[in-house]
Amino acid sequence: MSGDGCERSPLGRGALYLGPRRPGYGGHLSMVGRGRGAARGYGERNTMKSGVPLVIVGAGRSGTNFLSHVFEHDDRFWNAYESRYIWNYGQKTLTHDVRKLDEATAKVRQFIGRYFEQLSHKHDGRWVVDKTPSNVFRVGFVHEVFPDAKIIHIIRDGRDNIVSRVHEWYGGRAVNAQRERGKEASYRLALIRQRFGHLRTLVARGNLPAARWPTFLWDNVSTFSSHFLTGRPRRYAERFPGMDDCLGVYGLMETAAIQWREGVMRALCEGRRLPAGSYLEVRYEDLLSSPETQWDRIVGFLGIEEDRRARDWLLANARRDNFGKWKRQLSDEAVVALEPHVRPTLEFLGYSWEA
Protein backbone atom coordinates (compact mmCIF):
# COMPACT_ATOMS: atom_id res chain seq x y z
CA MET A 1 0.00 0.00 0.00
CA SER A 2 1.21 3.48 -0.79
CA GLY A 3 1.92 6.16 1.77
CA ASP A 4 -1.30 8.06 1.17
CA GLY A 5 -3.50 5.08 0.43
CA CYS A 6 -4.95 6.52 -2.76
CA GLU A 7 -3.29 4.37 -5.41
CA ARG A 8 -4.35 1.01 -4.01
CA SER A 9 -6.64 1.72 -1.10
CA PRO A 10 -8.82 -1.16 0.17
CA LEU A 11 -12.14 0.65 -0.05
CA GLY A 12 -14.51 -2.26 -0.57
CA ARG A 13 -16.89 -3.01 -3.43
CA GLY A 14 -16.91 -0.65 -6.36
CA ALA A 15 -14.81 2.00 -4.65
CA LEU A 16 -13.50 5.07 -6.42
CA TYR A 17 -9.96 4.99 -7.82
CA LEU A 18 -8.37 8.40 -7.58
CA GLY A 19 -4.93 7.88 -9.04
CA PRO A 20 -1.51 8.89 -7.74
CA ARG A 21 -1.01 11.57 -5.15
CA ARG A 22 -0.04 15.14 -5.96
CA PRO A 23 3.51 16.28 -5.10
CA GLY A 24 3.68 18.32 -1.94
CA TYR A 25 1.45 16.14 0.20
CA GLY A 26 2.85 15.83 3.69
CA GLY A 27 0.31 13.82 5.68
CA HIS A 28 0.01 10.15 6.59
CA LEU A 29 -2.79 7.89 7.73
CA SER A 30 -1.31 7.43 11.18
CA MET A 31 -1.79 11.15 11.73
CA VAL A 32 -5.58 11.12 11.56
CA GLY A 33 -6.77 12.74 14.76
CA ARG A 34 -3.66 11.90 16.76
CA GLY A 35 -2.76 14.84 18.97
CA ARG A 36 -0.90 18.07 18.28
CA GLY A 37 1.90 16.41 16.38
CA ALA A 38 -0.59 15.12 13.83
CA ALA A 39 -0.83 18.56 12.28
CA ARG A 40 2.86 18.75 11.45
CA GLY A 41 2.54 16.82 8.23
CA TYR A 42 0.16 19.41 6.86
CA GLY A 43 2.57 22.32 6.66
CA GLU A 44 3.78 25.34 8.53
CA ARG A 45 1.53 27.74 10.43
CA ASN A 46 -0.01 30.22 8.00
CA THR A 47 -3.04 32.29 8.86
CA MET A 48 -6.42 32.38 7.17
CA LYS A 49 -7.00 34.88 4.38
CA SER A 50 -9.68 37.57 4.39
CA GLY A 51 -12.67 36.80 2.16
CA VAL A 52 -11.72 33.13 1.87
CA PRO A 53 -14.06 30.64 3.60
CA LEU A 54 -13.10 28.04 6.16
CA VAL A 55 -14.43 24.87 4.56
CA ILE A 56 -15.49 22.00 6.81
CA VAL A 57 -16.05 18.76 4.92
CA GLY A 58 -17.21 15.38 6.08
CA ALA A 59 -19.74 12.71 5.25
CA GLY A 60 -23.16 13.84 6.47
CA ARG A 61 -23.73 12.99 10.16
CA SER A 62 -20.01 13.04 10.96
CA GLY A 63 -19.83 16.12 13.17
CA THR A 64 -19.58 18.92 10.61
CA ASN A 65 -22.54 20.68 12.20
CA PHE A 66 -21.06 20.33 15.68
CA LEU A 67 -17.70 21.75 14.62
CA SER A 68 -19.33 24.67 12.81
CA HIS A 69 -21.22 25.50 16.02
CA VAL A 70 -17.90 25.73 17.87
CA PHE A 71 -16.82 28.48 15.49
CA GLU A 72 -20.09 30.34 16.08
CA HIS A 73 -18.75 31.16 19.55
CA ASP A 74 -15.81 33.05 18.07
CA ASP A 75 -16.95 36.49 16.89
CA ARG A 76 -14.44 36.44 14.05
CA PHE A 77 -16.43 33.72 12.25
CA TRP A 78 -19.84 33.54 10.60
CA ASN A 79 -21.47 30.13 10.11
CA ALA A 80 -22.86 30.05 6.57
CA TYR A 81 -24.47 26.62 7.10
CA GLU A 82 -24.75 24.70 3.79
CA SER A 83 -24.26 26.12 0.30
CA ARG A 84 -24.97 23.24 -2.09
CA TYR A 85 -26.50 25.53 -4.70
CA ILE A 86 -23.50 27.81 -4.63
CA TRP A 87 -20.89 25.09 -5.00
CA ASN A 88 -22.77 23.32 -7.81
CA TYR A 89 -23.06 26.47 -9.91
CA GLY A 90 -22.24 25.59 -13.51
CA GLN A 91 -22.26 21.84 -12.81
CA LYS A 92 -23.51 19.85 -15.80
CA THR A 93 -25.26 17.16 -13.78
CA LEU A 94 -27.03 17.15 -10.42
CA THR A 95 -27.19 13.36 -10.12
CA HIS A 96 -23.86 13.31 -8.28
CA ASP A 97 -21.60 15.80 -6.50
CA VAL A 98 -18.20 15.01 -8.02
CA ARG A 99 -16.61 18.02 -9.69
CA LYS A 100 -13.41 17.88 -11.71
CA LEU A 101 -10.67 20.47 -11.37
CA ASP A 102 -11.25 21.85 -14.86
CA GLU A 103 -14.82 22.72 -13.89
CA ALA A 104 -13.42 25.59 -11.83
CA THR A 105 -13.61 27.95 -14.80
CA ALA A 106 -13.15 31.70 -14.46
CA LYS A 107 -16.94 32.17 -14.51
CA VAL A 108 -17.50 29.55 -11.82
CA ARG A 109 -14.69 30.89 -9.62
CA GLN A 110 -16.06 34.41 -9.97
CA PHE A 111 -19.61 33.38 -8.98
CA ILE A 112 -18.57 31.32 -5.95
CA GLY A 113 -15.87 33.78 -4.88
CA ARG A 114 -18.21 36.75 -5.10
CA TYR A 115 -20.84 34.92 -3.04
CA PHE A 116 -18.49 34.27 -0.12
CA GLU A 117 -16.89 37.70 -0.39
CA GLN A 118 -20.30 39.38 -0.19
CA LEU A 119 -21.34 37.14 2.69
CA SER A 120 -18.21 38.07 4.62
CA HIS A 121 -18.77 41.77 3.89
CA LYS A 122 -22.40 41.52 5.03
CA HIS A 123 -21.23 40.14 8.37
CA ASP A 124 -18.60 42.77 9.14
CA GLY A 125 -15.74 41.07 7.35
CA ARG A 126 -15.85 37.91 9.43
CA TRP A 127 -14.42 34.64 8.18
CA VAL A 128 -17.19 32.53 6.69
CA VAL A 129 -17.52 28.90 7.79
CA ASP A 130 -19.05 26.58 5.18
CA LYS A 131 -20.02 22.99 5.97
CA THR A 132 -21.71 21.78 2.80
CA PRO A 133 -21.79 17.92 3.02
CA SER A 134 -21.50 17.43 -0.75
CA ASN A 135 -18.05 19.03 -0.71
CA VAL A 136 -16.59 15.68 0.35
CA PHE A 137 -16.75 14.90 -3.37
CA ARG A 138 -15.11 18.12 -4.51
CA VAL A 139 -12.22 18.94 -2.17
CA GLY A 140 -9.86 19.42 -5.10
CA PHE A 141 -12.42 21.63 -6.83
CA VAL A 142 -12.82 23.74 -3.67
CA HIS A 143 -9.06 24.24 -3.62
CA GLU A 144 -9.07 25.28 -7.28
CA VAL A 145 -11.69 27.93 -6.50
CA PHE A 146 -9.99 29.06 -3.27
CA PRO A 147 -6.28 28.14 -3.32
CA ASP A 148 -5.82 29.79 0.09
CA ALA A 149 -8.79 28.08 1.75
CA LYS A 150 -8.32 26.02 4.89
CA ILE A 151 -10.15 22.69 4.63
CA ILE A 152 -10.95 20.62 7.73
CA HIS A 153 -12.11 17.06 7.09
CA ILE A 154 -13.93 15.52 10.04
CA ILE A 155 -14.10 11.72 9.99
CA ARG A 156 -16.46 9.53 12.03
CA ASP A 157 -16.68 5.77 12.53
CA GLY A 158 -18.76 4.64 9.56
CA ARG A 159 -20.97 2.36 11.64
CA ASP A 160 -22.10 5.19 13.90
CA ASN A 161 -22.48 7.37 10.85
CA ILE A 162 -24.77 4.84 9.18
CA VAL A 163 -26.97 4.49 12.28
CA SER A 164 -27.52 8.25 12.25
CA ARG A 165 -27.62 8.64 8.47
CA VAL A 166 -30.46 6.16 7.90
CA HIS A 167 -32.80 8.35 9.97
CA GLU A 168 -31.84 11.38 7.90
CA TRP A 169 -32.84 9.66 4.69
CA TYR A 170 -36.36 9.67 6.15
CA GLY A 171 -36.22 13.31 7.27
CA GLY A 172 -34.41 13.03 10.60
CA ARG A 173 -34.75 11.02 13.80
CA ALA A 174 -37.87 12.80 15.10
CA VAL A 175 -39.63 12.65 11.73
CA ASN A 176 -38.67 9.03 11.14
CA ALA A 177 -40.04 8.10 14.57
CA GLN A 178 -43.53 8.76 13.19
CA ARG A 179 -42.92 6.36 10.31
CA GLU A 180 -41.48 3.68 12.59
CA ARG A 181 -44.62 3.88 14.74
CA GLY A 182 -46.76 3.27 11.67
CA LYS A 183 -48.24 6.78 11.70
CA GLU A 184 -48.04 7.40 7.97
CA ALA A 185 -50.19 10.55 7.90
CA SER A 186 -48.23 12.09 10.77
CA TYR A 187 -44.99 11.08 9.10
CA ARG A 188 -45.87 12.80 5.83
CA LEU A 189 -46.98 15.95 7.64
CA ALA A 190 -43.76 15.98 9.68
CA LEU A 191 -41.76 15.43 6.49
CA ILE A 192 -43.34 18.49 4.87
CA ARG A 193 -42.58 20.59 7.93
CA GLN A 194 -38.99 19.37 8.02
CA ARG A 195 -38.32 20.11 4.36
CA PHE A 196 -39.88 23.56 4.47
CA GLY A 197 -37.98 24.27 7.69
CA HIS A 198 -34.76 23.40 5.91
CA LEU A 199 -35.74 25.65 3.01
CA ARG A 200 -36.46 28.55 5.36
CA THR A 201 -33.01 28.08 6.91
CA LEU A 202 -31.33 28.18 3.50
CA VAL A 203 -33.17 31.36 2.55
CA ALA A 204 -32.63 33.06 5.92
CA ARG A 205 -28.88 32.39 5.84
CA GLY A 206 -28.50 33.48 2.23
CA ASN A 207 -27.63 30.00 0.93
CA LEU A 208 -30.18 30.21 -1.87
CA PRO A 209 -29.84 33.40 -3.94
CA ALA A 210 -32.66 34.18 -6.35
CA ALA A 211 -30.54 33.13 -9.32
CA ARG A 212 -30.27 29.60 -7.93
CA TRP A 213 -33.98 28.98 -7.29
CA PRO A 214 -34.59 27.31 -10.69
CA THR A 215 -31.79 24.83 -10.00
CA PHE A 216 -33.08 24.20 -6.48
CA LEU A 217 -36.62 23.50 -7.70
CA TRP A 218 -35.43 21.30 -10.56
CA ASP A 219 -33.30 19.33 -8.13
CA ASN A 220 -35.88 18.84 -5.39
CA VAL A 221 -39.51 18.90 -6.52
CA SER A 222 -39.67 15.48 -8.16
CA THR A 223 -37.59 13.67 -5.53
CA PHE A 224 -39.54 15.16 -2.64
CA SER A 225 -42.88 14.44 -4.33
CA SER A 226 -41.84 10.83 -4.83
CA HIS A 227 -40.76 10.52 -1.19
CA PHE A 228 -43.98 12.12 0.04
CA LEU A 229 -46.27 9.96 -2.10
CA THR A 230 -44.51 6.61 -1.65
CA GLY A 231 -42.87 7.02 1.75
CA ARG A 232 -39.60 5.81 0.21
CA PRO A 233 -36.71 8.30 0.10
CA ARG A 234 -34.60 8.60 -3.02
CA ARG A 235 -31.58 10.41 -1.63
CA TYR A 236 -30.04 12.30 1.27
CA ALA A 237 -27.01 14.60 1.54
CA GLU A 238 -23.93 13.96 -0.61
CA ARG A 239 -24.37 12.01 -3.84
CA PHE A 240 -21.84 9.60 -5.30
CA PRO A 241 -21.96 8.46 -8.94
CA GLY A 242 -24.34 5.53 -9.28
CA MET A 243 -26.12 6.11 -5.96
CA ASP A 244 -29.57 5.59 -7.49
CA ASP A 245 -28.48 2.22 -8.86
CA CYS A 246 -26.98 1.22 -5.50
CA LEU A 247 -30.25 2.04 -3.77
CA GLY A 248 -32.09 -0.33 -6.09
CA VAL A 249 -29.54 -3.13 -5.72
CA TYR A 250 -28.51 -2.93 -2.07
CA GLY A 251 -31.31 -1.10 -0.28
CA LEU A 252 -31.03 1.92 1.96
CA MET A 253 -28.69 0.79 4.74
CA GLU A 254 -26.01 -0.62 2.47
CA THR A 255 -26.30 2.41 0.19
CA ALA A 256 -25.77 4.62 3.24
CA ALA A 257 -22.63 2.58 3.97
CA ILE A 258 -21.31 3.07 0.44
CA GLN A 259 -22.22 6.76 0.66
CA TRP A 260 -20.08 7.11 3.80
CA ARG A 261 -17.17 5.15 2.32
CA GLU A 262 -17.07 6.95 -1.00
CA GLY A 263 -17.35 10.39 0.56
CA VAL A 264 -14.70 9.83 3.21
CA MET A 265 -12.15 8.32 0.86
CA ARG A 266 -12.72 10.79 -1.96
CA ALA A 267 -12.20 13.71 0.44
CA LEU A 268 -9.20 12.06 2.07
CA CYS A 269 -7.43 11.25 -1.18
CA GLU A 270 -8.09 14.63 -2.76
CA GLY A 271 -7.22 16.47 0.45
CA ARG A 272 -3.92 14.69 0.90
CA ARG A 273 -2.83 15.78 -2.55
CA LEU A 274 -3.23 19.46 -1.69
CA PRO A 275 -0.28 21.72 -0.87
CA ALA A 276 0.95 21.63 2.70
CA GLY A 277 -1.07 23.74 5.10
CA SER A 278 -4.33 23.45 3.15
CA TYR A 279 -5.96 20.37 4.64
CA LEU A 280 -6.41 18.85 8.10
CA GLU A 281 -8.13 15.66 9.25
CA VAL A 282 -9.87 15.47 12.61
CA ARG A 283 -11.45 12.35 13.98
CA TYR A 284 -14.90 12.98 15.47
CA GLU A 285 -14.31 10.56 18.32
CA ASP A 286 -11.09 12.37 19.25
CA LEU A 287 -12.85 15.73 19.13
CA LEU A 288 -15.31 14.43 21.74
CA SER A 289 -12.90 12.49 23.94
CA SER A 290 -9.92 14.89 23.76
CA PRO A 291 -11.48 18.23 22.84
CA GLU A 292 -8.65 20.43 24.13
CA THR A 293 -5.98 18.54 22.22
CA GLN A 294 -8.00 18.57 19.01
CA TRP A 295 -8.90 22.24 19.37
CA ASP A 296 -5.20 23.07 19.75
CA ARG A 297 -4.58 21.25 16.47
CA ILE A 298 -7.36 23.14 14.70
CA VAL A 299 -6.31 26.56 15.98
CA GLY A 300 -2.70 25.84 15.04
CA PHE A 301 -3.74 24.70 11.58
CA LEU A 302 -5.74 27.89 11.02
CA GLY A 303 -2.85 30.02 12.24
CA ILE A 304 -5.02 32.29 14.38
CA GLU A 305 -5.05 33.40 17.98
CA GLU A 306 -7.46 31.42 20.10
CA ASP A 307 -10.80 32.79 21.30
CA ARG A 308 -11.39 31.19 24.68
CA ARG A 309 -15.17 31.26 24.28
CA ALA A 310 -15.04 28.77 21.43
CA ARG A 311 -12.86 26.41 23.45
CA ASP A 312 -15.15 26.72 26.48
CA TRP A 313 -18.21 25.90 24.38
CA LEU A 314 -16.48 22.87 22.90
CA LEU A 315 -15.45 21.57 26.33
CA ALA A 316 -18.96 22.08 27.69
CA ASN A 317 -20.70 20.37 24.77
CA ALA A 318 -18.34 17.55 23.76
CA ARG A 319 -20.31 14.44 24.73
CA ARG A 320 -17.69 11.85 25.45
CA ASP A 321 -20.26 9.04 25.22
CA ASN A 322 -21.61 10.03 21.80
CA PHE A 323 -19.87 7.29 19.86
CA GLY A 324 -19.99 3.52 19.72
CA LYS A 325 -23.78 3.58 19.48
CA TRP A 326 -23.70 1.14 16.60
CA LYS A 327 -22.83 -1.62 19.07
CA ARG A 328 -26.31 -1.27 20.59
CA GLN A 329 -28.30 -0.26 17.54
CA LEU A 330 -27.05 -2.46 14.70
CA SER A 331 -28.23 -6.06 14.61
CA ASP A 332 -25.78 -8.87 13.93
CA GLU A 333 -27.38 -9.30 10.51
CA ALA A 334 -26.85 -5.62 9.71
CA VAL A 335 -23.20 -5.78 10.74
CA VAL A 336 -22.66 -8.77 8.45
CA ALA A 337 -24.32 -6.94 5.55
CA LEU A 338 -22.25 -3.80 6.11
CA GLU A 339 -18.90 -5.53 6.55
CA PRO A 340 -17.81 -5.82 2.89
CA HIS A 341 -18.73 -2.18 2.28
CA VAL A 342 -17.03 -0.51 5.23
CA ARG A 343 -14.67 -2.82 7.10
CA PRO A 344 -11.64 -2.35 4.79
CA THR A 345 -12.02 1.42 4.93
CA LEU A 346 -12.56 1.49 8.70
CA GLU A 347 -9.42 -0.54 9.29
CA PHE A 348 -7.53 1.56 6.76
CA LEU A 349 -8.50 4.61 8.85
CA GLY A 350 -7.37 2.96 12.08
CA TYR A 351 -10.72 1.87 13.50
CA SER A 352 -11.12 -1.60 14.99
CA TRP A 353 -13.77 -3.76 13.36
CA GLU A 354 -14.42 -5.82 16.46
CA ALA A 355 -17.00 -4.44 18.92
Image (cartoon, rainbow, N blue to C red):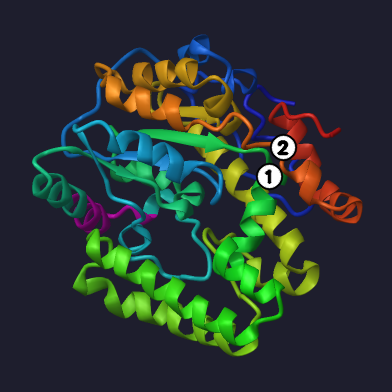
**What's the residue at 36%, 34% (across, down)?**
70
Vertical order, 158 against 205 (above or below): above
Judge the density around disc 2: few (<14), some (14-19), many (≥20) Cα neighbours within 10 Å.
Answer: some
Residue 100 on the magenta span: no
Image quadrant holding the C terminus, namely top right
Asked whether residue 105 is drawn in magenta, I would say: yes
Q: Amino acid at mark 1?
A: Asp
Q: Residue furthest top?
A: 37
The residue sitting at 10% across, 50% down in the picture is: 122
Please tell me whether the stretch drawn in magenta is mainly helix, strand or loop.
helix
Which residue, given by chain and number where applicable, does mark 1 sit on?
160
Q: Considering only order in the chain, which callout, 2 or 1, is on the residue closer to the N terminus?
A: 1
SS label for mark 1: helix
Q: Are marks 1 and 2 in contact (CB under 8 Å)?
A: yes
Classify 69 as above or below 221.
Answer: above
Q: Residue at x 20, y 30 (%)?
A: 49
Specify the amino acid type for callout 2. Answer: Gly
Name the spot of residue 254 as percent of width and height, x first. Answer: 76, 59
Q: What stretch of residues is rendered in magenta?
A: 103-113
For mark 1, does the 10 Å Cα neighbourhood hold few (<14), some (14 to 19), or many (20 or more) residues?
some
Q: Position of residue 163 (x, y in %)?
A: 69, 52
Q: Position of residue 15 (x, y in %)?
A: 71, 50
Q: Considering depth in this image, is 318 or 295 the residue closer to the camera?
A: 318
Identify the secondary structure beneath mark 2: loop
Task: Give the side of residue 285 with respect to residue 36, left or right.
Answer: right
Give the distance between the C-alpha atoms of the residues marked 1 and 2, in whole angstroms: 6 Å
Look at mark 2 in the image and give the residue it sits on: 324
Quick check: 326 left or right of 184?
right
